[in-house]
Image: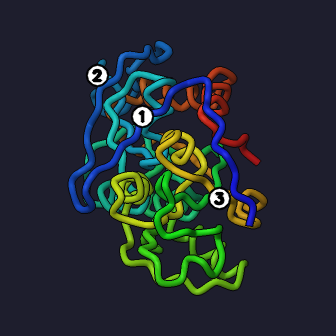
């Protein structure tokens, strides 16, 4: 299996590694969001606060670089659970279509969601590769492999690539966020992990990166939409426009995300 060297990106990435089960962190960020009126004629009262954005954990480095908001990053399925439970939010961004469809079917999204990026899985090990892994192959057997849980997008993608490559994976841990998988690898708590290419890029020299055959040909698609009943509708619309616009897509590309398909 070919072992690839990780190319440094022009824009530094920030690793988010949080313990599984901890509540998502809400992060205010300084970059300006395009201005838009927050008034909604005939709708519920709105304010001029920043939009509250629920977004997949793999977006935690790029979204703050695109627009100012109050961010809550977590696994996509967990974010839908929170929305269904009544958690206040103005925008939802999912790392797959399945969880966005779930939000749409539950009446949680206003209008049609928009695909804005793609991403795919790679295999990472600590830089010194203590288990001597040679790639996404039989060398993973008997190692401390960490993956995402099947109900989150990175976990569903893991199942798909394992099946496509005829591998039976026996992970020692299944995480609810891809950033937690990466965190265990970089901390030396795991011999290997399956993460998105963008997350691996963010880890820089801390990891070795191996291609997963076929993963780049069938990537995860990322979707964004305004949450129904948003109390900051104008800011929500402006945020979606920033992410899906020319500059937003250029910034996504700079962080290693693929173009929407």
Residue 115 shows up from this direction: yes
| Residue indicated by mark 3 | 210
Query: Which label is found at residue 49?
Result: 2
Q: Residue at x 57, y 69 (%)?
A: 133
* Nearer the camera: disc 3 or disc 2: 3
What element does badge 2 sit on? loop
Separation of residues labelled 3 and 1 (CA atoms): 21 Å
Closer-to-camera residue (81/40)? 81
Q: Residue at x 39, y 21 (%)?
A: 38
Residue 42 occupies quadrant? top left
Mark 1 or mark 2: whose residue is earlier in sequence: 1
In the image: residue 71, left or right of residue 106: left
Q: Is residue 68 above or below residue 95?
A: above
Residue 158 occupies quadrant? bottom right
* Nearer the camera: disc 3 or disc 1: 3
| Residue indicated by mark 1 | 14
Q: Is residue 147 above or below residue 14?
A: below
Residue contact between numbered discs 3 and 1, judged by CB atoms under 8 Å:
no
What element does badge 1 sit on? loop
Closer-to-camera residue (138/17)? 138
* Nearer the camera: disc 1 or disc 2: 1
Closer-to-camera residue (3/37)? 3
Say few, some or many: other residues with alpha carbon within 10 Å of mark 1 (under 14 / 14 to 19 / 20 or more): few
Estimate the x, y position of residue 50 in percent, counting from the top left: 33, 24
Residue 233 occupies quadrant? top left
Separation of residues labelled 1 and 2 (CA atoms): 26 Å
Separation of residues labelled 3 and 2 (CA atoms): 43 Å
Estimate the x, y position of residue 15 in percent, counting from the top left: 40, 40
Say few, some or many: other residues with alpha carbon within 10 Å of mark 3 (under 14 / 14 to 19 / 20 or more): many
């Amino acid at each position: 299996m070919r072992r690839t060297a990780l190319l440094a990106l022009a824009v530094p990435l920030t690793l988010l590694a949080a313990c599984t089960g901890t509540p998502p962190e809400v992060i205010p960020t300084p970059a300006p969001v395009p201005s838009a009126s927050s008034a909604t004629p005939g709708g519920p009262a709105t304010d001029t606060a920043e939009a509250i954005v629920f977004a997949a954990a793999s977006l935690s480095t790029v979204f703050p670089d695109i627009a100012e908001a109050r961010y809550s990053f977590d696994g996509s399925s967990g974010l839908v659970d929170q929305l269904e439970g009544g958690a206040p939010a103005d925008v939802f961004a999912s790392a797959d279509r399945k969880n966005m469809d779930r939000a749409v079917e539950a009446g949680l999204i206003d209008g049609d969601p928009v695909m804005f990026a793609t991403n795919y899985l790679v295999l990472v090990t600590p830089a010194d590769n203590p288990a001597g892994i040679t790639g996404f192959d039989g060398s993973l057997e008997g190692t401390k492999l960490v993956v995402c849980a099947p109900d989150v997008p990175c976990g569903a993608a893991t199942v798909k690539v394992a099946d496509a490559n005829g591998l039976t994976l026996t992970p020692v841990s299944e995480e609810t966020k891809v950033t937690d998988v990466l965190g265990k690898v970089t901390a030396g708590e795991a011999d290997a992990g399956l993460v998105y290419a963008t997350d691996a890029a963010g880890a820089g020299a801390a990891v070795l990166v191996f291609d997963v055959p076929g993963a780049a040909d069938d990537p995860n698609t990322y979707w964004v939409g305004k949450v129904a009943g948003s109390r900051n509708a104008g800011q929500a619309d402006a945020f979606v426009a920033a992410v899906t616009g020319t500059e937003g897509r250029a910034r996504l590309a700079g962080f290693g995300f693929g173009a929407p398909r």
